[in-house]
Image: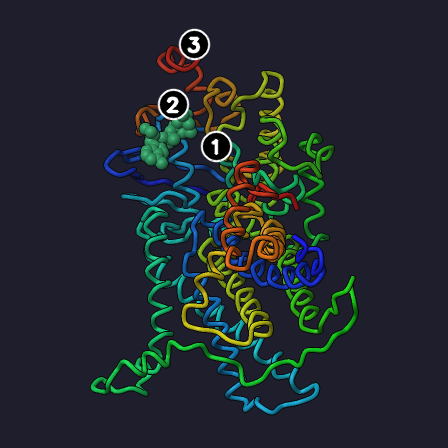
Amino acid sequence: MLLEVEDLSVNYGHIEAIRGLTFGVEEGSIATLIGANGAGKSTTLKTISGLRKIRTGRVLFDGKDIAKVPAHERVQLGISQSPEGRGVFPGMTVRENLDMGAYARKDRSSAALKPDFDRVLELFPRLSERINQVAGTMSGGEQQMLAMGRALMARPRLVLLDEPSMGLAPKLIQQIFEIIKEINAQGTTVLLVEQNAAQALRLADTAHLLETGEIVRSGTGHELATDSSVREAYLGG
Amino acid sequence: MQFLFDNFFALTISGLALGAVYALIALGYTMVYGVLQFINFAHSEVFMYGTFAVVWVLYFMGASGTTGPAVYGKFAIALLVAMAVSASVALLLERVAYRPLIRRGAPRLIALISAIGASFMLAEAMGLRDRLVGFVGLDDELAPYVARARDTRGLPLEIPRVGLFTIGDYRVTNIDVIVILSALLMMVLLDQFVRRSRLGRGIRAVAQDPESAALMGVNSTRVVQLTFLLGGIMAGAAATLYMVRIGATRFDAGFLMGVKAFTAAVMGGIGNLRGALLGGFVLGVAENWGSAVIGTEWKDVVAFALLVLILLFRPTGLLGESLGKARA
Ligand SMILES: Nc1ncnc2c1ncn2[C@@H]1O[C@H](COP(=O)(O)OP(=O)(O)OP(=O)(O)O)[C@@H](O)[C@H]1O
Ligand SMILES: [Mg+2]
């Protein structure tokens, strides 16, 4: 297992956002967390990347407990996140945003970054057309692509994607899922959070359904996609 | 009005020199605000400690009576020491008056109050320095020492004024040139650092989106320290140029300069480095012109009336956008 989450609980004040989550992500696989608004999906990702404090439980990355590692050091371990609501740097250009993705890398020379730039621009040709545009003036979908591309610039072993399809046109959603598949095929492990359950389950090797902070179903993507209660509540019958 | 026309170039150029000092101080306010959305009220004291550093270094080097190029050498050393002293005070402030509060989740308003408190403490400590460092015993009669420590301190050495060239009917002096050019140079260096260097990018990233910055691997504690450090260095440079121009300081010299610099920062668009520069120069020149037209005693009124006017028409300041949002 590349990532193991054991009995994880996180609070906001007295509110328990997640309770006793246990799941793992196999190296090289795509895992997904699905669930309704407020189920605790984003909180789970933010806790893995270190932005939220663990109340109880453990997060193991590559077998090591990372609870004590501050957020800004986790990217060096190989964990990279594309945050919810995109979180691009609005005043920086596309190029600068991508550069920020490589901020923590040891090899930061432009020669070393070149292959990664090329790879990202190949995955998202839209970005190369807009390489000098200020991110804050780009459309929502373009910012989404930029956030994903930026997360890849760190050359992560595990990439956490928080609702990459949010607010996108259907055609673009299809594209984004293709790209996620491609990223995974190039060797990056993916943990995907999605409202768009049908698509996510089609892609995922393993899937977990969250309800009010707890995992209520786990299985392969296919198993959850065919589970009658999941179908009813999340896939429109 | 006639006085303004007769002395137009003199007023403008000395206004630019004054504005250069405002601008250098304003950078500290604006950078810390850009990263933390917090007004470091004690920044005026960071500047004031720099002015005393200049006085002390020149005394310590036995500077009085120096002549020739050595004068410039001694002021160069004073500049370095003043930058170091101001930067240390700024870092101390961050560590003591700011970081512990924010770490415990205190709102920005609390940090502001803490900074106001720190400002008074630092100013009073300077006003009581003889007593604090033990030159005055606890049982001595305090009043005369306090009075003396609160007097204006002059420099033992001044750069001799030399007229260099003439603009209009004003003979531009070496002091004007030194002050304006060194301030511009410092500002260009800072601007390039923030725009081009990796750490500068880290500063902009934290200013624009602190959580995303952490995800990229930016250590925000270091970035905050760095902003205080850079602000302190700029204030130290401002302090040296101020002493070169004015030649004297006092424990409360920071207050009005701080308020003016803060005004310049807001005028230019708080959070915006180039805005601080523009605001400083506009304020310095406007003050001089205004006092020429309606009288020197109205100088500060002119400055603040101008601020209100500018904010009425451009609520986010002349250049608007914050440090974060400003385009590279
Ligand atoms: N900063 C916060 N302060 C207080 N409560 C929060 C905070 N962030 C999240 N919560 C609460 O924690 C719970 C889980 O939120 P979370 O953002 O993890 O949900 P989510 O599954 O990502 O939802 P969505 O699909 O809408 O993004 C919600 O009840 C939410 O209101
Ligand atoms: Mg969410």
Please tell me which of labels 2 and 3 falls first in the chain: 2
Chain ID at mark 1: A
Identify the residue at image location x=69%, y=39%: A119
> Residue A69 vs residue B22: left or right?
left
Give the residue drawn at x 51%, y 24%: A166
Q: Is residue B273 visible?
A: no
Quadrant of the image where one finds ligand 1: top left
For image coordinates 69% across by 66% down, the residue present is B181
Please give left or right for residue A100 compared with residue B170 in the image: left
The amino acid type, in three-letter code, at marker 2 is Asn
Residue wearing tag 2: A37
| Residue denoted by label 3 | A236
The answer to whether marks 1 and 3 mark residues whose Cβ atoms lie closer than 8 Å is no
Question: From the Cβ of disc 3, is ligand 1 less than 8 Å away?
Answer: no
Q: Which mark is residue A197?
A: none
Q: Amino acid at mark 1?
A: Glu
Q: CA distance from mark 1 to mark 3?
A: 24 Å
Q: Which residue is situated farthest in the front direction here?
A: B2
Chain under disc 2:
A
Amino acid type indicated by mark 3: Gly
Q: Residue furthest top?
A: A237
